[in-house]
Image (spheres, rainbow, N blue to C red):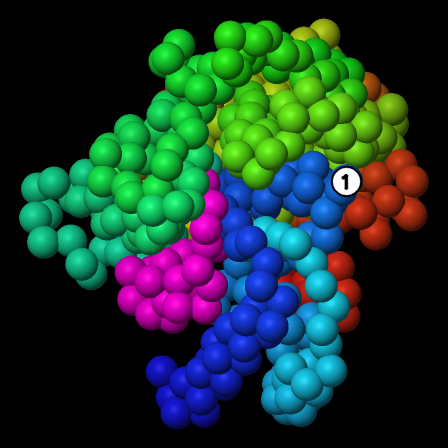
Amino acid sequence: MNLAKSLVLYILRVSARIQLWKIRPVVIGIGGSSGKTSTAKFIETILSEKHGVLATAGKNSETGIPLSILGIKISNYSFADWLKVLLLIPLRILADFKKYDFLVAEMGIDSPKPPKNMGYLLRIIKPEIGALTSIDYEHSVYFEPFVENKKRFEEEILDLIAREETLLLKSLPRDGWAVVNMDDPEILKASKDLRASQVTVSSENKDADFFLENVEIHKDRFIIEFTNKEKQFVLKIKQPLPLYFAHSFVLSIAVCSVLGVDVSEAIRTLEDKFSLPPGRASVFNGIRNMTIIDSSYNSSFEAASGVLGLLKEVGKDQRKIVILGDMRELGKMSGILHEKLAEEISKNSDFAILIGPQMKKFTSVKLKKIDFPHRSFETYSAAKDFILNHVKEGDVILVKSSQNTLFLERVVADLLKDKDDVRLLARRGAFWDNLRQKTP
């Protein structure tokens, strides 16, 4: 890391801590391999009913978190933008005393080394309440150099990722609260070493504080039945969602419950004000009377598998097409997980359109072996004409991909019935428009 970058990060980190010292909010940290943004958004939605809340809103990095705390927006990440940031920071510290009660911070890790690790993020903020959604192989390529026992490669990669993620829960103070997803083995293991008090969530262990009894996915709604303190509750959301959203909802309700929010009140707020961050299983009307499930923001094996299950439920009586892009940054795990994803594709869809070199190298080969109908392309540009010519009246189409090198929100934009809905897609603004134009 060069000197200039180190200096900027230092200024951001110290300035954010000064700003938090001024405001003194309760800090809530949300981590995990997938589902962070949705869980954090649900918490923000519930708490905002009666409290002032600042949320990092998907900005989960070593720069995104402090910029959110300082209230500084950056669009192009150019030298001029960063110069503007450095000029604005003193003004924010001296003049911005706007009070809020809670900071809801999404905390994303890309590596075991600073500034991309949990340890570095914990130097910026000190959560008093924390929750992890899940632990999976996301960004595993950056953990590979630290694997010592090559014979236990998969296990060690997951151990390394878990070690970083669980630092969030282990860092919580004795008078803090950890909301523990007992269904994730790595999180459950870490829960034995926490100082903070715990609230548990599970769909498997009936002794959990919040026990998920039943989840139903319908074409027009999503229903969760759960118990807490021997009382039964039902949450009804007026749109279909992947199964893994059940944990996101209940984790968010559990977090708010330790802050004194009544469970029934939290449910009412979610039912009345539910909305999704862009590109996380949003449903749109498409051309030719199609239904589009837009999950183009990012991808991992766990998330892709979950949204494929949603496709199966939503498209029970229709042709189901899945348009999938590479799951990136998986390193040596890429082949294993892309081949494994082929099995989920064959169980939950009728036709697959694959985009990206990893999909072509691994997923397509596996689908050919089981004789599943599909087409594979290296880029969005190469696939565009085939997609537009192949989709038919009444199809249900799922779009899912990792971010940055593919930008498959472009597929969603091509298929939208109402082109004004483009504003609701992932990665809006001049910076992203420029990247999309440069990407085939």
Quarter of the picture holding the N terminus: bottom left
Q: Secondary structure at mark 1?
A: loop
Q: How many marks?
A: 1
User: What residue is shown with label 1?
Assistant: 49
**Amino acid type of the residue that numbered disc 1 sits on in the rendered structure:** Glu
Decide if residue 85 is in sight here.
no
Q: Is residue 94 above or below residue 199?
A: below
Q: Residue at x 29, y 30 (%)?
A: 188
Q: Name the residue: 80% across, 47% down.
A: 424
Q: Is 250 in the magenta? A: no
Question: For residue 129: magenta?
Answer: yes
The quarter in which the C terminus is drawn is: bottom right
Is 110 on the left or on the right of 92, as rendered? Answer: left
Residue in the image at 44% along x and 89% along y: 7
- The answer to whether residue 150 is above or below residue 2 is above
- Give residue 154's position: percent from left, percent from top: 21, 40
Quarter residue 42 falls in: top right
Instruction: Give the magenta range.
Output: 107-132
* Relative depth, front residue between 3 and 175: 175
- Residue 351 image position (x, y, % from top left): 60, 23
Quarter assignment of residue 318: top right
Residue at 63 percent of width and 40 percent of height: 43
- Residue 147 vs residue 372, the one in the foreground: 147
Front in this rendered view, residue 440 or 82: 82
> In this rendering, is residue 424 above or below 21?
above
Q: Position of residue 187 (x, y in %)?
A: 32, 35
- Whether residue 287 appears in this view of the structure is yes
10 Å crowding of disc 1: few (<14), some (14-19), many (20+): few
Residue 218: x and y in percent read 70, 12
